[in-house]
């Protein structure tokens, strides 16, 4: 354990699920971030500050790309509805 983290409670290193609330409530993003949070919670070589830096990097990334993500999801929905209509014919 890094000396700078000596006073940080164990649960702050392991239980990172509460950070999911800070991300867009879009299912693919939530699933991806659940995997990221699980991965970094298991990494005992990262300090709590480094873990927070990683989480903040992803938060910034998804915030900047939110328009593109929404466009892609809308295109996916339109394609699915088109396929559904084509299958009914």
Image (cartoon, rainbow, N blue to C red):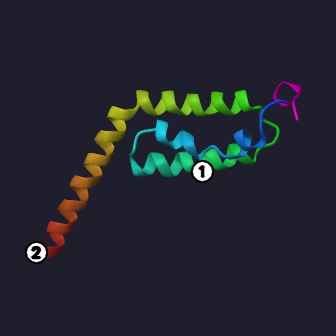
User: Which region is colored magenta?
Assistant: 1-6
The image quarter in which residue 54 lies: top right
Along the line of sight, the residue nearer the viewer: 49 or 28: 49
Residue lying at 88% horizontally and 35% vertically, measured from the top left: 1
The reply, left or right, for residue 41 in relation to residue 35 is: right
Q: Which mark is residue 89?
A: 2
Question: 76 or 15, which is in the foreground?
Answer: 15
Neighbour tally class for label 1: few under 14, some 14-19, many 20 plus, Cα within 10 Å: few
Q: Which mark is residue 35?
A: 1
Q: Position of residue 12 (x, y in %)?
A: 70, 39
Residue 56 in the figure: left or right of residue 67: right
Question: Would residue 25 appear left or right of 9 to someone viewing this image?
Answer: left
Which residue sits furthest top?
A: 4
| Image position, residue 69 (x, y; %) | 36, 39
- Mark before the other along the chain sequence, 2 or 1: 1
Query: What residue sits 55% from the left and 39% below the top?
Result: 19
Relative placement, left or right, of 65 versus 43 is: left
The quarter of the picture where the C terminus appears is bottom left
Q: Secondary structure at mark 1?
A: helix
Q: How many residues crowd around disc 2 within 10 Å: few (fewer than 14), some, or many (20 or more)? A: few
Looking at this rendering, what residue extends furthest in the bottom direction?
88
Q: Is residue 77 magenta?
A: no
């Amino acid at each position: 354990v890094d000396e700078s983290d000596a006073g940080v409670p164990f649960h702050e290193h392991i239980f990172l699920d509460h950070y999911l609330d800070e991300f867009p409530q879009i299912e693919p993003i939530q699933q991806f971030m659940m995997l990221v949070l699980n991965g970094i919670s298991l990494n005992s070589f990262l300090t709590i500050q480094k873990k927070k830096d990683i989480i903040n990097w992803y938060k910034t990334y998804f915030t900047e790309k939110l328009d593109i993500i929404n466009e892609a999801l809308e295109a996916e929905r339109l394609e699915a509805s088109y396929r559904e209509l084509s299958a009914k014919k």
